[in-house]
Image: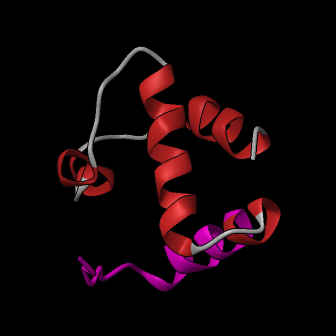
Amino acid sequence: MVKVLTIRDEVYDKLSKVKSKLGGSFGSSIEYLIDSYNKSGKEASIGQLAGSVQKFKINRRTAKKVMENV
């Protein structure tokens, strides 16, 4: 099943860079990021992460580490 997501331009640009590094699709890039988050000891699904950027301050060190592992 296909779902439509709305994201800010800045998020799209970052996701596009992840997609290019992985050589896959946007869906596989999102899945990779969620799996990386889950490996950090926290369990999450796309539904649980929706809007989390606006609700919580992001730990930039963790986000940078995830992006470096791409």
Horizontal side of 17 relative to 39 (left or right) equals right
- Residue 3, given in percent of the width and then of the height, sits at 24, 79
Please state which of residues 12 and 28 is positioned toward the viewer in this rendering: 28
Q: Residue at x 53, y 47 (%)?
A: 33
Residue 59 shows in the view: no
The total of numbered circles placed on residues is: 0
Q: Residue at x 76, y 38 (%)?
A: 69
- Picture quarter with the N terminus: bottom left
Q: Quadrant of residue 63?
A: top right
Membership of 26 in magenta stretch: no
Q: Residue at x 23, y 57 (%)?
A: 50
- Residue 52, given in percent of the width and then of the height, sits at 26, 49
Residue 24 shows in the view: yes
Horizontal side of 37 relative to 43 (left or right) equals right
Q: How is the image coloured?
A: secondary structure
Q: Which residues are magenta?
A: 1-18
Membership of 3 in magenta stretch: yes
Please state which of residues 28 and 34 is positioned toward the viewer in this rendering: 28
Please state which of residues 48 and 63 is positioned toward the viewer in this rendering: 48
Give the residue furthest to the top. Answer: 41
- Residue 27, given in percent of the width and then of the height, sits at 48, 68
Q: Residue at x 78, y 41 (%)?
A: 68
- Residue 64, given in percent of the width and then of the height, sits at 68, 40
Horizontal side of 66 relative to 32 (left or right) equals right
